[in-house]
Image: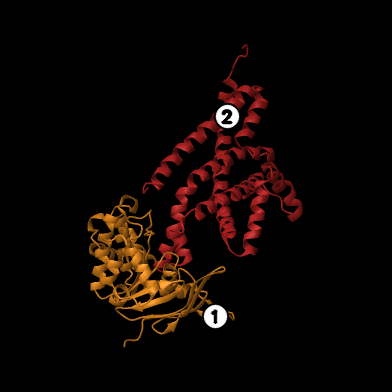
Amino acid sequence: MNEPILRVTELNKKFGEHHVLKGIDFSVEQGERVAIIGGSGSGKSTFLRCLNFMEMPSSGTVSLDGKEIGKPAGKNGERRYPESELCLVRERVGMVFQQFNLFPHMTVLENAMEGLLTVKGMKKEAARDLAVKELDKVGLADKHDAYPGRLSGGQQQRVAIARSLAMEPEILLFDEPTSSLDPELVGEVLVVIRKLAEEGRTMLLVTHELGFAYHFATKVIFLADGVFHEVGTPAEVLKNPKQERTRAFLNRFTEFAF
Amino acid sequence: MSYQWDFSGVWSRWDILAVGLLNTIKIAAVSIVLGIVVGLVLAFLKLSPKKYLSAPATAFIEFYRNTPPIIHFFWFYYALPVLANISLDPFVAAVLALSTQSGAFYAEVFRGGIVSIEKGQWEGGRSLGMRHSQLMRRIILPQAMTRMFAPFVERSFELTKTTALASTLAYADLLYQAMRVNSETFRPLEVYTTIALMYVVLLVTASTLSRIAEARLTAYR
């Protein structure tokens, strides 16, 4: 057993009175690929976003390499998170968003270089080399000077992946990376993610693409009502689910299959 | 109409009006620059989640937005010396009045531009490990600027026209100089028509330049 690179203990997230994540325990080892599935509103995106502190957990801890992030503050398990510490975590835990969140005032190349220049303080030439390499990898070598607004959704998402990869994160989080794409553009993004899987990267993917999850993941989590309802290998969870709720969820997906 | 237009008295005193025009440009430019500083500070204070920072900024902004500009001129020129025992030069008093009041308006323009940037832009930057200040400088402000530009220019034009109030403090701006020319020529129609046209030419030129700048700023769209 490897030591987990990322560990979550008793993670709770509340939005006001709404209790979204209910005491989740979870860990990821180096090289694992975790697919998180579940209905909308089940808390899967919120869970992912707590891992790089896009959302602040209401209580519980997130640890990277055995080190707990933040400091305890208050009686109810709340923690205080200094900005400098969160920035370091986010450098190591990259994220790709459903809506890409590219910087529209920068070209494709500038987008991919931005983190390297601003966060890592790299020299322009070195940052450019690295950004070019990652853009090549996602198949956008010919789009360096284009602005994101001129690209298709699939191309934009590939730029976003390259931007995240350029930071050389140890863990990559994908938050429904294909959900806002036209169906014919989904494939090109999934091909890139599959390529990253083949490189042995540690990744967590929130998705509705169950077929892709089946082939991509080493572990599948079915999240419902803020708890992990079922966890197992893709075959276990997607082919032979033990829980009635998981079966019902999967049936809805296969209802119109042919 | 029987009125006989005669601009000869105005033409022969063009140098007096030229000084006024230059002074108007000078006071507008200085007040715009200082107003931007005041506006940025107020905008950031007002955006702060800390009440003790945002509340005074809101009060300041509301005070200036809801009082006639001429009161600020009189206050800085006549009241401040009494309170602080310093007498201000008309130029300094007028710049203080103009830059604080335009700062209050700019603050709303800047704040509006900043809050109009989608949440995803903040998250995109944060996900790379950017600090708040880096995000502001590299991602948010550059995009906000393009959205602020049109209202900012409009406000600056308002400010430029408001500089005419500096004449009430005997600052030699375009209006003050016009009053001088008028007192020598007794041709108010010609004098005030001339300076009205000078304001038009000044602001139309500035408007053209600002449109060119805006086109460059938003080239990526």
In front of the other: A162 or B67: A162
Q: Is residue B6 above or below residue B125?
A: above
Amino acid type at mark 1 = Gly
| Contact, mark 2 vs mark 1 (Cβ under 8 Å) | no
Query: Looking at this view, is A91 or B37 the one in front?
Result: A91
In the rendering, at what x and y percent does residue A192 appear? Answer: 25, 65
Q: Quadrant of the N terminus of chain B?
A: top right
Residue B28 picture location, percent across and down? 56, 43
* Residue A180 in the figure: left or right of residue A74: left
x, y percent for residue B146: 45, 49
Q: Which residue is mark 2?
A: B196
Chain letter, disc 2 residue: B
- A88 on left or right of B74: left
Along the horizontal axis of the image, is A198 left or right of B129? left
**As displayed, is residue A192 above or below residue B68?**
below
Q: Local crowd at mark 1 within 10 Å, few (<14), some, or many (≥20)?
A: some
Q: Residue under label 1, please give it.
A: A77
The CA distance from mark 2 to mark 1 is 68 Å
Say which colour chain B has: red
In the image, what residue occupies the spot 23% across and 62% down?
A136
The hue of chain A in the figure is orange
Up/down of A213 relative to B70, above or below: below
Q: Nearer the viewer, residue B146 or A50?
A: A50
**Residue A30, quarter of the rendered image:** bottom left
